[in-house]
Amino acid sequence: MSKTIHPVLLCGGSGTRLWPLSRKSYPKQFVNLMGEESLFQASAKRLAGDGFAAPSVITGADFRFVVIEQLAALEIAPADILIEPSARNTAAAICAGALVLEAREPGALMLVAPSDHVIPDPARFRAAVEAAARAAEAGQLVTFGIRPDRPETGYGWLELSEAPDSEFSATPQPLRSFVEKPDLAKAEALLYGGMHLWNAGIFLFSTSAILDAFAKHAPETLAQAKAAVTAAERDLGFTRLAPEPWAQLEDISIDYAVMERADNLTVVPYGGAWSD
């Protein structure tokens, strides 16, 4: 990769999807579901090594020591751990993460990823990231689309501007639109139509590009996130975002707040196995 990529792991969760194995104080990304490592640890390892900077983690106060312990077990030292005072969805978290990273390294490439995905082919995923990095360096907001293998109603979908090749190679192309979680009939039509991918919820962009997009499409989110970052406090190696401005932030996803309104969108297909 021509430019270092800074991973930002989103690490919230209510712990309800796999209860009682997963629970509110210990959601599924921290549980060893797929072997000796938790999903969070697997995500951190997948985004480590050559070409990647130390990760930042955005999480809640209840999980901060679990994050430290699980990263330490991998001998990974985080660049920062941002503590959200309350859950405000992905737009707020990503905006705050971008502001902190921009202050540390202006114009850095920022790879935003949930910490609870299962990606059995990390080499293929890395190739997709490398392809996406070139588009992100050119100012694009890049999202990753997953080859669908069933009419899934629990995911959002992405409409392509052209059909992917038979190998679903990681070739960037303009993204036509985001599609909300469909009902079964619509999901079947999307699957067999061949022009849609699952929305992975993984994004790559420069800090400058995404902050420009927030300024244009979600200025209130940007203003409140700036206030929360400016008044943040350092506490035992954590960065606690200020609760008062954070409470004013809208509970909205990055898709709705920014991505579906932007005109510099690129999608990179990922054709390997996938599980959420």
Image (tube, helix red, strand yellow):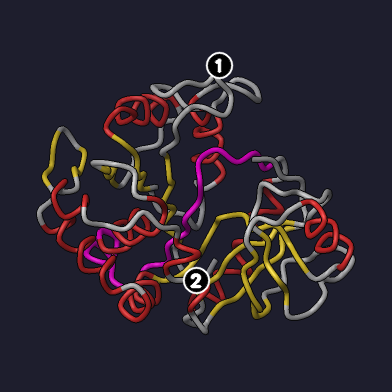
Residue 165 image offset from top left, x and y in percent: 86, 71
63 relative position to 121: left or right: left
Q: The disc labelled 2 sits on which kind of residue?
A: Met
**Residue under the image location 58 percent in, 65 percent down:** 143
Cβ–Cβ under 8 Å for marks 1 and 2:
no
Q: The disc labelled 1 sits on which kind of residue?
A: Leu
Q: Which residue is mark 1?
A: 21
The first of marks 1 and 2 along the sequence is 1
**Residue under the image location 55 percent in, 56 percent down:** 202
**Residue under the image location 64 percent in, 40 percent down:** 276
Q: Is residue 168 above or below residue 261?
A: above
**Residue under the image location 52 percent in, 48 percent down:** 47
Tell me the CA gap for discs 1 and 2. 34 Å
Number of numbered discs visible in the structure rendering:
2
Instruction: Point out the stretch of residues depicted in magenta.
Output: 100-119
Residue 238: quarter of image: top left
Residue 267 image offset from top left, x and y in percent: 64, 71
Q: Secondary structure at mark 1?
A: loop
Residue 128: quarter of image: bottom right
Q: Which residue is mark 2?
A: 259
Please check the rendered image and state whether residue 110 is part of the magenta-colored stretch, yes or no: yes
63 relative position to 159: left or right: left
Residue 270: quarter of image: bottom right
Q: Is residue 165 above or below residue 85?
A: below
Q: Secondary structure at mark 2?
A: helix
Task: Give the crowd class for mark 1: few <14, some 14-19, many >=20 residues within 10 Å.
Answer: some
